[in-house]
Image: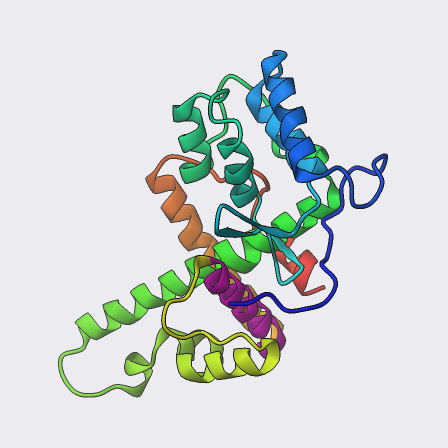
């Protein structure tokens, strides 16, 4: 998908640094120097994330989209980009644990509040949008898919309109094709054939925003709790809590339905 023309949004950095600076290469050099000088690699990584300004870039032919719909910040994707540039300085097992399971180093005490302070308020707010708008939304979709499969298995015979509806119809009130058409009308993005992971995340975030606009508050709260419960079950299955922010329905309600 070609990028749309127009000014490129900038992710906020520390207040003491002028807009547009520093450049990506400078941030990477400073991060590498900090690690080589003895700073823990995860602290140096968070400081680099806090200084980062580009919402997206192409590196060696790969398109990295860190900021989705100018609202949702995929911080682990940026972490992958930065750690690739410091692979010789970071223990491979700890790198893989962070990028694949969001497991932070056990020898470093950084809580969610410190994480928010280091990456900055603008990025942290966008990080919450990513968690609720993409991760929790995906968990909600999975929970509803499982509900539908259970209902189909429990059905003795015959057609049941409620059971035979798709996950998209049950959550969003429209078929997948109808939603893709509406998404195209609103964003100009065509979703067909091979769809990149970045485009699919953007579509998921669009579905989240569509759900907020089309459902009443009671339904929004119910579906959000379902998504949070599914995400919690998945994380308990691997004995890990997602770091970066606490997630619950009270925080969601205060943020999106106040």
Please state if 126 lies on the left or on the right of 215 as rendered: right
The quadrant of the picture occupied by the C terminus is bottom right
Write the residue at 56% across / 59% down. Answer: 133
Write the residue at 66% across / 38% down. Answer: 24
Residue 249 in view: no
Front one among 30 and 235: 30
Front one among 30 and 11: 30
> Picture quarter containing residue 215?
bottom right
As for residue 127 lying within the magenta part, the answer is no
The prevailing secondary structure element of the residues shown in magenta is helix
Residue 78: % across, % down:
56, 42
As for residue 206 lying within the magenta part, the answer is yes
> Picture quarter containing residue 212?
bottom right
Front one among 31 and 216: 31
Position of residue 60 relative to residue 68, above or below, is: above
Position of residue 143 relative to residue 127, above or below, is: below
Residue 66: % across, % down:
59, 50
- Image: magenta residue range: 198-215
Residue 61: % across, % down:
48, 51
Residue lying farthest to the top in this orientation: 38
Write the residue at 40% across / 42% down. Answer: 235
Residue 100: % across, % down:
40, 39
Front one among 187 and 6: 6
Residue lying farthest to the front in this orientation: 60
Q: How is the image coloured?
A: rainbow
Write the residue at 72% across / 36% down. Answer: 51
> Picture quarter containing residue 35?
top right
Please state if 156 lies on the left or on the right of 238 as rendered: left
Please state if 145 lies on the left or on the right of 121 as rendered: left
């Amino acid at each position: 998908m070609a990028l749309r023309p127009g000014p490129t949004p900038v992710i906020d950095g520390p207040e003491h640094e002028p807009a547009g600076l520093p450049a990506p290469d400078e941030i990477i050099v400073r991060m590498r120097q900090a690690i080589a000088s003895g700073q823990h690699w995860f602290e140096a990584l968070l400081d680099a994330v806090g200084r980062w300004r580009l919402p997206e870039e192409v590196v060696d032919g790969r398109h990295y989209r860190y900021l989705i719909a100018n609202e949702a910040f995929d911080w682990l994707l940026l972490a992958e980009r930065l750690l690739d540039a410091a692979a010789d300085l970071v223990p491979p097992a700890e790198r893989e644990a962070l990028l694949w399971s969001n497991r932070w180093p056990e020898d470093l005490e950084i809580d969610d509040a410190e994480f928010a302070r280091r990456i900055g308020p603008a990025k942290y707010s966008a990080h919450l949008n990513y968690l609720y708008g993409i991760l929790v939304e995906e968990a909600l979709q999975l929970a509803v898919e499982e509900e539908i499969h259970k209902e189909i298995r429990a059905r003795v015979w015959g057609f049941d309109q409620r059971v035979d509806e798709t996950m998209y119809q049950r959550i969003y009130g429209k078929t997948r094709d109808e939603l893709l058409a509406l998404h195209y009308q609103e964003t100009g993005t065509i979703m067909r054939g091979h769809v990149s992971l970045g485009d699919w995340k953007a579509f998921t975030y669009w579905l989240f925003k569509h759900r907020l606009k089309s459902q009443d508050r009671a339904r929004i709260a119910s579906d959000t709790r379902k998504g949070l419960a599914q995400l919690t079950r998945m994380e308990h299955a691997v004995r890990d809590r997602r770091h970066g922010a606490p997630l619950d329905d009270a925080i969601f309600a205060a943020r999106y339905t106040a």
